[in-house]
């Protein structure tokens, strides 16, 4: 089941650009974002005694190292959002089978909407309901980002000024409710319909017919993520699992008829680098031999397909159809680690989680303008030697983002009624500056009356990429429905600020 071929693979593709060490200052177990577990019970009328006690109560309610229930997570996110409306935005991407909201907290200096030039990043945890460490890590990460920003810590200011970070602590809340605390068994892995969500996405390597069948029976949690990917141009992502300690990178599936290099993607060298950023910033993942029942993994990383092929996975879907590079992070040997191990597990992952976010600034970004100087959507921006199954395209703002290691690359930009633009330039640095190299492409309209150049390079790509999951009219984003809770919390915070 495990990655026998990873050694050869890693040696062959060792990147010359080594993962940057992420320097973080002032770490401590100082978790300031308060949990407000009893907010539901607060009425609008509070006794004067309680008012006087509020400044004492709220700072004492720390984000504890334990497994919070789904409703506690919701309360925590609401509380963080209410206390920090300038740098957070809370939204739901849809509901689970049993009707639980799939909450996402966005963090950044413009948390409510995309800003041109600011890349979108995301973390998703708990798509397998019984793999639970990610829920804890992502809440701690939110706490850390907010605390760091409020304390004017350089690393936090850099990250939140340069990046919009979306965090979905649980993609499978129903599965979590059904999970037992076993380390290896699968009770709670599936959603309420008994479906493995990491097998439920359309698969680029499946036939067109199978893709359509998959779409028809798409689970609500999968549908929510698919719709979410259409609302933002995510550039980099990771989804967090448990049961091993390894950073796994696309593809998870491959062409079964391909004898050599099956499962290896056109961005392999970037993905290997990204996986190493995580494993080498983790306390021990890079050793590759930590878990007794999985591995060894050279450098603590593996190609997903070479570990074990799977169909309908989320990372391949992100990469192929949403042009978002995604890793699958397996972060604990035990799927449901004992709660007393959580502080140490957070410290194992803290630096890696932050360092990985910074990688969204790798490579190059910019806009594509047409012959009139207007930004254009759907221009194909292709890197020679990195021909993606579905070519990467500019978004509605004319933007493109391309994660690339430092080096010289040739770009080809195609847009109907315009000359094919070919440019070669150097990307001199990595993500250290919290901005990718900026480079715009200025297209020239065809004036000779020649035929429109093809927007797609090959017929094979046409077949795969013309398949589009039906849009549902942008209805994925449901407004928060927590008015009572929200009012209670707002009142609490307002009163507290008045008293202090
Ligand atoms: Zn999993």
Image (tube, rainbow, N blue to C red):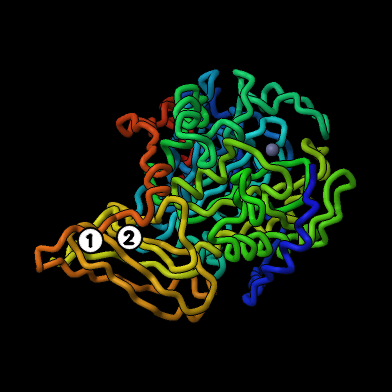
Q: Earlier in the sequence, mark 2 or mark 1?
A: 1
- Mark 1 crowd level (few <14, some 14–19, many ≥20, 10 Å Cα): many
Quadrant position of residue 52: top right
Is 341 left or right of 60, judged from the image as shown? right
Looking at the image, which residue is at 14% across and 66% down?
446
Residue 21: x, y in percent?
A: 67, 72
Q: Residues within 10 Å of mark 2 (few under 14, many from 20)?
A: many
The answer, for residue 337, to whether it is visible in the render is: yes
Tell how many labels: 2
Counting from the top left corner in percent of width and height, residue 427 is at 46, 78
Mark 2 vs ligand 1: CB below 8 Å: no
What secondary structure is marked by label 1? loop
Q: Secondary structure at mark 2?
A: strand
Is 32 above or below relative to 101? below
How far apart are the two marked residues, 2 and 1, measured between alpha carbons?
Answer: 8 Å
Residue, x 67% and y 30% (percent of image)? 129
Name the residue: 19% across, 58% down.
Answer: 452
Q: Is residue 277 left or right of residue 298?
A: left
Q: Which mark is residue 399?
A: 2
Q: Quadrant of residue 147?
A: bottom right
Q: Can you say whether 141 is above or below 476 in the image?
A: below
Q: 375 and 188: which one is in front? A: 375
Q: Are marks 2 and 1 in contact (CB under 8 Å)?
A: yes
Q: Position of residue 415 (x, y in %)?
A: 25, 59
Percent across and percent down for residue 332 are 77, 45
Q: Is residue 395 left or right of residue 257?
A: left
Residue positioned most to the right: 292
Question: Which residue is denoted by mark 1 in the rendering?
Answer: 375
Q: Is 291 or 425 nearer to us in this picture?
A: 425
Q: Is residue 44 visible?
A: no
């Amino acid at each position: 089941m495990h990655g026998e071929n990873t050694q050869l693979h890693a040696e062959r593709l060792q990147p010359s650009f080594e993962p940057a060490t992420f320097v973080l200052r002032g770490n401590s177990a100082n978790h300031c974002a308060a949990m407000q577990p009893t907010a539901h019970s607060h009425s609008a009328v509070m006794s004067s005694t309680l008012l006087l006690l509020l400044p004492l109560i709220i700072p004492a309610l720390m984000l504890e190292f334990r497994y919070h229930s789904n409703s506690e997570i919701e309360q925590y996110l609401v509380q963080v959002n209410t206390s920090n409306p300038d740098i957070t935005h809370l939204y739901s991407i849809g509901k689970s089978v049993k009707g639980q909201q799939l909450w996402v907290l966005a963090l950044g200096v413009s948390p409510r909407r995309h800003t041109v030039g600011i890349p979108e990043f995301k973390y998703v945890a708990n798509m397998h309901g019984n793999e639970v460490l990610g829920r804890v890590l992502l809440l701690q990460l939110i706490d850390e980002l907010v605390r760091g920003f409020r304390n004017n810590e350089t690393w936090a200011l850099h990250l939140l000024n340069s990046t919009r970070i979306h965090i979905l602590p649980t993609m499978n809340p129903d599965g979590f409710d059904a999970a037992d605390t076993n380390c290896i068994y699968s009770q709670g892995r599936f959603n309420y319909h008994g479906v493995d969500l990491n097998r439920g996405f359309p698969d680029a390597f499946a036939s067109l017919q199978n893709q359509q069948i998959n779409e028809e029976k798409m689970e609500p949690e999968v549908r929510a993520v698919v719709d979410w990917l259409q609302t933002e141009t995510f550039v980099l992502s990771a989804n967090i699992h448990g049961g091993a300690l390894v950073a796994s990178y696309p593809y998870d599936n491959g062409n079964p008829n391909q004898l050599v290099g099956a499962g290896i993607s056109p961005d392999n060298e970037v993905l290997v680098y990204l996986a190493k950023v995580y494993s080498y910033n983790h306390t021990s993942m890079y050793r590759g031999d930590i878990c007794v029942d999985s591995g060894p993994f050279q450098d603590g990383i593996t190609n997903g397909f070479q570990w074990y092929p799977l169909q309908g996975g989320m990372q391949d879907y992100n990469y192929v159809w949403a042009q978002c590079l995604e890793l699958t992070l397996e972060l604990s040997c035990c799927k449901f680690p004992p709660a007393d191990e959580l502080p140490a597990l957070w410290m194992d992952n803290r630096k890696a989680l932050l360092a990985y976010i910074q990688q969204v600034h790798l490579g190059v970004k910019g806009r594509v303008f047409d012959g009139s100087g207007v930004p254009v959507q759907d221009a194909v921006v292709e890197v020679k030697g990195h021909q993606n199954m579905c070519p990467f395209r500019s978004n509605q703002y004319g933007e493109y983002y391309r994660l690339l290691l430092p080096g010289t690359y040739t770009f080809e930009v195609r847009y109907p009624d315009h000359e094919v633009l070919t440019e070669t330039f150097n990307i001199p640095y990595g993500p250290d500056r919290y901005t990718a190299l900026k480079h715009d492409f200025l297209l020239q309209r065809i004036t000779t009356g020649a035929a429109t150049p093809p927007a797609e390079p090959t017929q094979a790509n046409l077949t795969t990429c013309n398949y589009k999951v039906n849009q549902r009219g942008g209805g994925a984003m449901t407004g928060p429905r927590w008015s009572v809770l929200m009012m209670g919390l707002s009142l609490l915070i307002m009163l507290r600020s008045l008293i202090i």
